[in-house]
Amino acid sequence: MRLDKFLKNSRIIKRRTVAKEAADGGRIEVNGRVAKAGTDVAPGDMIQIAFGNKKMTLEVASVPETVRKEQAQDMYRLIGEEE
């Protein structure tokens, strides 16, 4: 699944266009490499997102094509947050 779609479906970022802008701006890394919006993500991948002065690290748990709001948090595991 594309990175921007994963971030939107998991509700980490609310809109796909915002996820695309963050990725294309170099604020998202997948497995230690700067990622573009079209980067494929799979279970086990580590994603690091920079939100202003905050950094969030998470692990991809699953990548279903469709997901209900209640199940969105099951798509990833939060590893840590840094200021």
Image (cartoon, helix red, strand yellow):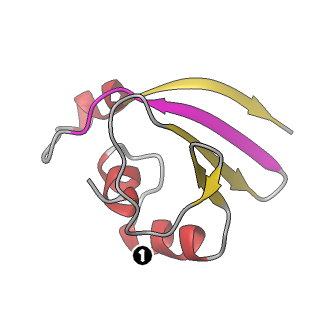
Three-letter code, disc 1: Thr
Task: Work out whether residue 40 or residue 5 is closer to the camera in this orientation and state it.
Answer: 40
Q: Report the residue marked by disc 1.
A: 17
Q: Give the residue at the far left of this rendering.
A: 66
Q: Quadrant of residue 44?
A: top left
Task: Work out whether residue 73 or residue 2 is closer to the camera in this orientation and state it.
Answer: 2
Above or below, 45 relative to 2: above
Q: Which residue appears at 55% of the width and 25% of the height? A: 78
Classed neighbour count for the residue bearing mark 1: other residues with Cα under 10 Å, few (<14), some (14–19), many (≥20): some
| Dominant SS in magenta | strand
Q: Which residue appears at 25% of the width and 29% of the height? A: 70
Figure label count? 1
What percent of the width, then of the height, locates residue 16? 37, 68
Describe residue 4's horizontal placement relative to residue 18 as left or right: left
Q: Magenta segment range?
A: 54-63
Residue 72 inside the magenta-drawn segment: no
**Rendered-image quadrant of the C terminus:** top right
At mark 1, the secondary structure is helix
Describe residue 51's horizontal placement relative to residue 63 as left or right: right
Q: Which residue appears at 47% of the width and 46% of the height? A: 12
Describe residue 10's horizontal placement relative to residue 23 as left or right: left
Residue 61 inside the magenta-drawn segment: yes
Q: Quadrant of residue 68?
A: top left
What percent of the width, then of the height, locates residue 9? 29, 49
Describe residue 8's horizontal placement relative to residue 67 as left or right: right
What percent of the width, then of the height, locates residue 27? 67, 63
What percent of the width, then of the height, locates residue 76? 41, 29
